[in-house]
C-alpha cells in the first residue's frame, strides 16, 4: 500500500516541478477488479462486463457505489485502498491460488472432452473415407 501511495506522491511532485507532464492513475480490467475483491472475500463468479463488479466490490469493501465509475474516482478508490491491510493481501493471494487451481482443472476437463470429440470425429471420417 505504501509503495502505491509513494508512487502517487512522486507523480504529483513531478507535476509540480515545472515539467509539462500530467499523470493520471487508473485501471480498467477484470483482473484488477477481481484482485480488489479477493482481498476481502471469495469471488468465484464469472462476469461478462466489468460494470458487474460493482456488487462484489460493494460487498467486499462495505460500500454503496452505484457504478464502477464512482468507485474509480480517486478519492473513493484511495479510501477503499486505505481499508486494506497486509493480511488482506495474503488472503487475496490464497484466494487467487484457489481460482487458478479450479481453472487448471476445468481446462484439463475441457481438453479431455475436446480430444474425445475430435477422436470420434476422426473415426467417423476414416470410416466414411474408406
Image (tube, rainbow, N blue to C red):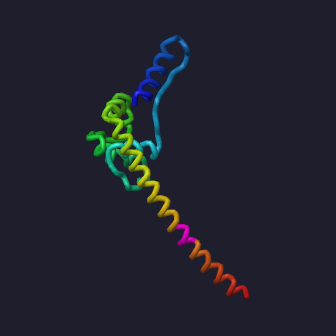
Left or right: residue 60 compared with residue 23: left
Q: Closest to the observer: 91 or 109?
A: 91
Q: Closest to the observer: 31 or 67?
A: 31
Span highlighted in magenta in the image: 110-114
* Quadrant where the N terminus is found in the figure: top left
Left or right: residue 108 compared with residue 123: left
- Residue 20: give x, y in percent of width and height: 55, 16
Residue drawn at x 40%, y 27% as measured from the top left: 2
- Residue 99: give x, y in percent of width and height: 43, 54
Residue drawn at x 47%, y 25% as measured from the top left: 7
- Residue 32: give x, y in percent of width and height: 44, 42
- Residue 96: give x, y in percent of width and height: 42, 49
Vertical comparison of 12 with 127: above or below: above
- What secondary structure characterizes most of the magenta part? helix
Left or right: residue 109 compared with residue 91: right
Q: Closest to the observer: 66 or 38?
A: 38
Residue drawn at x 69%, y 83% as measured from the top left: 126
Residue drawn at x 50%, y 24% as measured from the top left: 23
Farthest residue, direction right: 130
Amino acid at each position: 500500500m505504501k509503495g502505491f501511495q509513494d508512487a502517487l506522491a512522486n507523480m504529483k511532485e513531478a507535476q509540480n516541478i515545472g515539467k509539462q507532464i500530467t499523470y493520471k492513475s487508473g485501471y480498467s480490467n477484470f483482473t484488477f477488479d477481481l484482485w480488489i475483491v479477493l482481498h476481502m472475500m471469495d469471488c468465484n463468479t464469472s462476469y461478462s462486463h466489468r460494470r458487474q463488479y460493482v456488487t462484489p466490490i460493494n460487498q467486499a469493501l462495505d460500500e454503496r457505489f452505484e457504478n464502477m465509475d464512482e468507485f474509480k474516482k480517486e478519492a473513493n478508490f484511495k479510501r477503499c485502498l486505505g481499508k486494506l491491510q497486509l493480511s488482506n493481501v495474503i488472503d487475496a493471494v490464497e484466494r487467487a491460488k484457489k481460482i487458478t487451481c479450479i481453472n487448471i482443472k476445468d481446462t484439463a476437463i475441457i481438453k479431455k472432452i475436446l480430444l474425445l470429440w475430435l477422436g470420434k470425429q476422426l473415426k467417423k471420417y476414416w470410416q466414411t473415407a474408406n
